[in-house]
Amino acid sequence: MDLKSKSSHKQYNVAFVGNPNAGKTTLFNSITGSRQKVGNYAGVTVEKVYADVILGQLDVRISDVPGLYSLEPVSADESVAVSVIQSEVDLIVCIIDASNLERNLYLFSQISQLKVPMVVAVTMVDRLAGKGNELDIVALSEELGCPVVAVVGHKEEGIANLRQEIETGLLSLVVPSCEIHSVGIENLRMRLARIGYDVSPEGLSLELQKSEPGFVKYFSEFPELKEDYLKAQESLTGLTVADRFAWAKRVQDRCLSVSGQRKGLSITDKVDRILTHRFFGLIVFTAVMYTVFLSIYSLSQPFMSLIETLFAWMGSKAGLLLSRNELIQSFVVDGIIAGVGGVVVFLPQILILFFFAFLEGTGYLSRAAFLMDRLLGWCGLNGRAFIPLLSSFACAIPGIMAARVMPDAKSRLATILVAPLMSCSARLPVYMLLIGAFIEPKFGAFWAGTALFGMHLLGLMVAIPVVFILNRGILKGKRLPFVLELPPYQLPKWKDVLIALTTRAKVFLTTAGTTILVMSILIWAAGYFPRLPESQKANMEPKLVQQAQLEHSALGRFGKIIEPVFMPLGFDWRISTAIICAFPARETVVPSMGILFSLGSGAKVNELREQLQKAKLPNEKPLFTPWTAVGMMVFFALCAQCFSTLATVRRETGSRKWAYFMFVYMTALAYIGAFVVQLLGKALGN
């Protein structure tokens, strides 16, 4: 049922606003049931996200806007947040982290002056209580002049009260009534009070606006008043940063009771001595990343076998039902069922990769960004670029969009141009196919995991010198200082991890059901037509007919045309055609290779690996060697083979030239990289 049909009222607009790491997105999920990804570093919400809910009898659209520290944005993601807040909203829910009360109140002090109805949600109260501290919610509500609700989003504590306060706030539309006075006015008022001139802050502000305030007569008797008077006059033009923080400190001192001074270092401080160490921190980071990729390779195999068996059974059943018509049988079995099955088989690896996203919730990835600042600094980027680069290991598109966290245009553009060099999940099936066929059988599981880790590391290692060249030659950018909040360590919120896995699985399967399915059908059709004349089939051995049909088809003829371009890399017409077929979506590579190596797009991974091992060149030499496999993986690691990524670059940069530039330079890097691998293999006699 449509939400609007449940209520006759208008749709109200509510914005969730708060500092990064304040628990805003977790709270948004709890209120709306929305399936948004939750992270523990600044900038996780790159674009505005909204959800429609019913609160009592009200139809409400709640927007989760990007995190920000003030209403003076320094990056594109903060600009999105400010634009939402300053646009037409009926109520703002200001999320305040109880464990960082003073800093969060600074943002509240700015928002309160917009004169928009507001409700405050105080998060992390459980963390505050764990330290033996206590926040007086009633006193805080009095100081802020608006309703305040204590919540623990991931435990659903206080959620019902917050929903009720939002509904009440939308009906009453009461704006915050807190008074924030400047330090200058407060100092002058106190000095005047000591000499017998008692006046309220509001009254003093009115006095200061007069051409000759009533207390001017005291200047001759108390000349020190003049300096305070001049400072107070300056404050009439607007509140300063110092004024806002002074007010926030006064509110915190009144409302927050601290159990006592902490003795010694906290657990977070002790752990950070290792994890942020310039040497041991990098060792731990490398070990963590290697464990992730080794797990992807080793844990996924049983699930992949199960999926292969399921799709093989579906193909055999469909083949029997359609056996009377060879064309329709091939279309359904090899084009549809096998095309999707050839991609879905890699779903376990994708999910294992995203399972390790729980590291975000622990606070560790903020430390990784701190370490990456040292690695990225010499090329002109700071550690803030680690956020979009890390996102690009899942998919380049959200990684490019996450570059909005960069504080200036040149750093943002440099980050966008190298983000697709990170090995996204769509490249994973290619790595797994070739590593399983040529690395693991000869060198073992350890080196297979090392190869997988190396392919993901390659993009980052190439990105660093690329950014250096861009900043020195094209963009003329410079390194900016890096300021990062390191949140305390905590256990991951497994509900949020499950939400992330579910979302990623849906995205992956949706892609398989649209672009990849269409491409699989097109590739099947190109390999099926035109048909080989029956007269030629009559003189061939049955096992050679399928290969001859493929070479006779439109797909085979196209591959023969482009083969000379890729032959220096050791790639014949079949590999070259698979590369070209991957441009709409990299996920189509494995189904394409199944067709190109005469197994059909639904070939089991093990069957395709065996076929690749047996594949020959016209001179009867093996088509693939370990060096050829590595060269092909290097090509896929560095090449820009995703139309959606290029379209996102155009949208984010506002220019086609940067999308063209990315495509050209990454394709050139891929070609050169594969060529160097081929030369190295020949030099070593392989």
Image (spheres, helix red, strand yellow):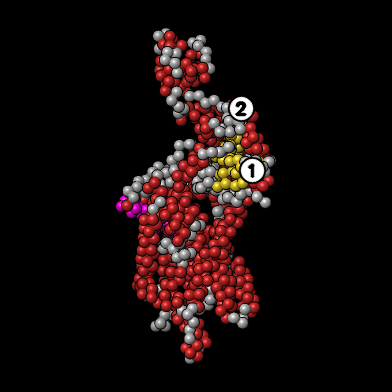
The percent position of residue 546, horizontal first and vertical second, equals 50, 82
Residue with the most extreme front position: 8
Mark 1 = which residue?
59
Query: Which quadrant of the figure has residue 98?
Result: top right
Q: As shown in the figure, which amino acid type bears the numbered disc 2? A: Glu
Query: Which quadrant of the figure has residue 418?
Result: bottom left
Name the residue nearer the viewer: 380 or 398.
Answer: 398
Vertical placement of residue 160 versus 37, above or below: above
The question of residue 470 being in magenta is answered with: yes
Residue with the most extreme bottom position: 539
User: Does the rendering let one see residue 124?
Assistant: no
Mark 1 or mark 2: which comes first in sequence? 1
Residue at the (52%, 30%) spot, across then down: 113
- Mark 1 or mark 2, which is nearer to you? 1
- Helix, strand or loop at mark 2: helix
Vertical placement of residue 493 versus 69, above or below: below
Residue at the (50%, 24%) spot, across then down: 181
The percent position of residue 491, horizontal first and vertical second, equals 60, 48
Quadrant in which the C terminus appears: bottom left
Q: As shown in the figure, which amino acid type bears the numbered disc 1? A: Asp
Residue with the most extreme left position: 473
User: Does the rendering let one see residue 627?
Assistant: yes
Mark 2 = which residue?
142
Q: Residues within 10 Å of mark 2 (few under 14, many from 20)?
A: some
- Give the dominant element type of the magenta stretch: helix, strand or loop: helix
Q: CA distance from mark 1 to mark 2?
A: 29 Å
Query: What segment is highlighted magenta in the picture?
Result: 456-473
Residue at the (36%, 75%) spot, across then down: 564
Residues marked 1 and 2 touching at CB (< 8 Å) = no
- Helix, strand or loop at mark 1: strand
